[in-house]
Amino acid sequence: MRIFFYLALFFCSVYSFSQDFQYSSLLIKEELKDNADAVVRFDEMVVDILAQDNMLLKSKRVVTVLNKNGNKHVNAYAGYSNSSKVKYIKAIVYDAFGNEIKKIKEKDFKDVSAVSGGTLYSDYRVKYLDYTPTGYPYTIVLEKEIQTKNTAFLPTWNFLDGYGVSAELSHFKLNFVHADLKPRVLEKNTENYNIEINETPLSIDCKGVEISALKKEQLSPMFNQISPKIMTRLIDFHYEGHDAHVENWEQLGEWMYVNLLQGRSELPESVKSHITNLVKNVDSDIEKARLVYEYMQSVTRYISVQVGIGGIQPIIASEVDRVKYGDCKGLSNYTHALLEVAGVKSYYVHVEAGNNKIDFEEDFPTLAQGNHAILAIPNGESYTWIDCTSQTHPFGFVGDFTDDRKAFVIRPNGGEVIKTPVYLNENNSQKMEGEIQLLEDGAIKVSAVIETKGIRYDNRFYIEDLDKDKILEYYQDTWASINNLILEKNEFKNDKEKVKFTEEVQISAKNYAKPSGERILFSPNVLNKNSFVPKRYRTRKLPFQIQRGYKDVDSYVISIPEGYGVEALPEPVEIISEFGEYKMSVLKQGESLKYERRFLLKAGKHPKEKYSNYRSFRKKISKNDGAQVVLIKK
């Protein structure tokens, strides 16, 4: 009985956040393990704002990693530069029972440049823990302290790291020495969680307790759209020797232009002369910009440095010209300088880039938003947008890396949050026309022309630069339902002015159709079967999102083997839904068949209650895309 008493006392012990903190994974509540790859046992950051140009960030983070997928949530690193110093960083690793495995001192952390491939950003470095676990679960305790003069980047506090992570206690506290340094706070998605925010005259204290992991479901929204977090900013801040007072985006834009961008357009006289000659016979500003953009693409290369990691001030244009490389900031500023020589106005832009669309907060001006820089060129009442990090994208096409999101445009007289170009639904089109010869033994020969635009263009135009084997591999993956595919011929045309990619392809394959006695069965949708059916959930927890949508238009003429007639054709189908439209028909046309298909998928956000309707819509499309024709020997 005494043994059971001590066991009960052990498992029911109260969670303490003192020095007696228990690191055994056995103490984690089962509900916090549900759907979790890792559990953040304790996550605390205390930010001491000591002056407009002096900030101390002290943090302690305890993470129990339950499986291999949870390793990415350890987050054991610290960045530093000439303006930010790591005062200390240390870690301890514990096993599942809370026994200490390893102590890691600061000298044991790897210290590397935050930037690979270039020397212009050598001041920015990262100390990180490279630990390979010997088993699961294990726990890492990380403590660090960072001192910085830059108060422009107050932390955004995320109570959850991402899908598949829960939190026992998440604590974020801001201390400030006087009321003028009180940060502004923006709460996002905190209402449905056990989160409290308390203020005193000189502090803001935020606590979240026992926040369960969110399980990622198919078509789930981007995590940042639904996760609880606290955004913070100072009205009076300091950055790299410059003080600022910012109430709105307009003031922030003006401050950035004057202090960080102005005077960084210096170029060698030889380059100025070349650009002047390049555009001397061109009247249109947009055509001048196109020529300058294509020149920039031809003489530079991109190295990856996110905004924030390598600072927010771009390298001076003459330095980029000298070394012929730069990050997004450097290349955007360099292109801006070239355009200036050509007499074309352009504006520097901060944006949150990535396949997921993340907007700038319109009522919360802060330098902490955005991870990428591009340019906006005034074009009448709108803008032409260019991403200067791409050596292949057409002029004026940014693709899915920065499309359809609110970005920060910086002008000499102030800044403004503006939406980038939108590629939705019909804008992302694919048109496919084909001639298909079906042979009696089930083999096929296909000649097809495929035209893609918008994001569909973005997903395909790169194949023109692949070698022969990779092109074959690409089509074998794209048309995976065609076994033994042989690529007989291919020709590509990349029309960058119209942003249209055209593929002329000839393929052949054995055993596509299934001869059975006097009959041949085959699917007339040879090249564009869409078999995607969303996963079924007994109880869907999250809303769902179709990010961009697209439109397919397919038309094939299918020659059937001589001596065969049609025994059965799929019935024509038309489906109209709030999620899109689908239309398919197979008609006899002399000794051939004419297959036509149209599919429009609409972008949109939908509540979880409509998920089963969407699944049903996609299930019908998958079924009809796989419909069969039956031929019979005459």
Image (cartoon, grey):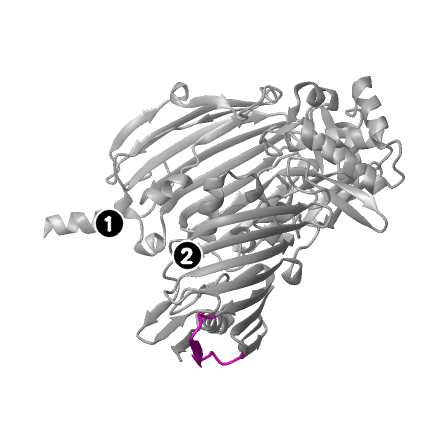
Q: 270 or 147, which lies in front?
A: 270
At label 2, which amino acid type do we have? Answer: Ala
Regarding mark 1 in the picture, which secondary structure is present there? helix
Magenta stretch encompasses residue 565 = yes
Part of the protein shown in magenta = 560-573
Inspect this view and state whether residue 219 appears: no
Q: Position of residue 131 (x, y in %)?
A: 35, 30
Q: 390 or 505, which lies in front?
A: 505
Based on the displayed image, in which of its 4 quarters is residue 628 positioned? bottom left
Q: Is residue 429 left or right of residue 229?
A: right
Q: Where residue 509 is drawn, which disc sits there?
A: 2
Residue at x 84%, y 37% (from the top left corner): 345
Q: Residues within 10 Å of mark 1 (few under 14, many from 20)?
A: few
The C terminus lies in quadrant: bottom left
Q: 126 or 633, which lies in front?
A: 633
Q: Is residue 124 left or right of residue 568?
A: right
Residue behind mark 1: 11
